[in-house]
């Protein structure tokens, strides 16, 4: 079965994480970045998760998972060391039509986390359909070398240029041609060599 790749807007949506150990902790920063509302269910939590709860950055319910914990949830993540609990979260998600990821448990997943390269708003995600996370990690490291931090700055410039061209309403075909030209490798190399980026002027 082939997976459908997509990037999801989670701003203001509730994501429930069952489990509050190191694995669960590692999933949370990305949810913060996406401005999701994070609800954590677990009797105990790592010091960092407890700190986030005290700061009000997430909701931590210090108890075992209840089916009602998935009320109003958009996504569920089962990140406990108890396969039975993870399966229960998956089953309840399935019944409610909520997408669920049970960490390192392919049978109890509707979606997988990809290996991601992030450069500002540029995101490159790699998936092996759960067959080899190690290969996905290797490819991620290779892409990190190819796509450096300069891409984050360049993408901001491309976005600003796109907005400016659209505001002038000079014709869709012409705007498209200009934007494709600006997005070429040649233009990126010129940008990287510019004085602003610390390179030699072209």
Image (spheres, rainbow, N blue to C red):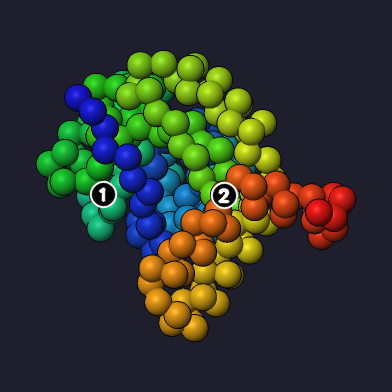
Q: Position of residue 140 (x, y in %)?
A: 55, 28
Picture layout, residue 80 above or below residue 173: above
Picture layout, residue 139 above or below residue 97: above
Picture layout, residue 10 above or below residue 47: below
- Which element is circle 1 on? helix
Q: Position of residue 170 (x, y in %)?
A: 45, 80
Q: Position of residue 148 (x, y in %)?
A: 68, 40
- Residue topped by disc 1: 70
Q: CA distance from mark 2 to mark 1?
A: 45 Å
Residue 196 visible to the viewer: yes
Q: Position of residue 20 (x, y in %)?
A: 48, 37
Q: Are marks 2 and 1 in contact (CB under 8 Å)?
A: no
Q: Is residue 117 left or right of residue 75?
A: right
| Snapshot quadrant of residue 92 | top left
- Residue topped by disc 2: 184
Instruction: Tell me the tag on residue 136.
Output: none
- Which element is circle 2 on? loop
- The answer to which of marks 2 and 1 sits earlier in the sequence is 1
Picture layout, residue 121 above or below residue 147: below
For the N terminus, the image quarter is top left
Kindly report which numbered mark, 2 or 1, lies closer to the viewer in this rendering: 2
Q: Is residue 126 left or right of residue 198?
A: left
Q: Residue at x 41, y 34 (%)?
A: 113
């Amino acid at each position: 079965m082939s997976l459908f790749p997509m990037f999801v807007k989670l701003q203001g949506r509730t994501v429930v994480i069952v489990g509050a150990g190191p694995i669960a902790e590692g999933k949370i920063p990305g949810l913060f970045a996406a401005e999701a509302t994070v609800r954590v269910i677990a009797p105990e939590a790592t010091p960092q998760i407890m700190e986030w709860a005290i700061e009000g950055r997430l909701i931590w319910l210090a108890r075992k998972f209840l089916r009602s914990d998935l009320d109003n949830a958009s996504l569920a993540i089962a990140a406990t060391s108890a396969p039975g609990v993870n399966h229960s979260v998956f089953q309840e998600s399935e019944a409610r039509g909520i997408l669920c990821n049970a960490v390192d448990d392919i049978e109890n997943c509707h979606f997988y986390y990809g290996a991601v390269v992030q450069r500002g708003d540029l995101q490159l995600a790699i998936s092996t359909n759960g067959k080899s996370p190690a290969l996905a990690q290797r490819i991620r490291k290779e892409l990190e070398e190819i796509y450096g931090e300069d891409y984050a700055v360049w993408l901001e410039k491309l976005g600003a240029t796109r907005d400016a061209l659209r505001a002038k309403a000079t014709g869709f075909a012409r705007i498209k041609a200009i934007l494709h030209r600006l997005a070429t490798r040649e233009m990126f190399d010129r940008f990287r060599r510019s004085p602003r980026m610390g390179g030699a002027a072209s």
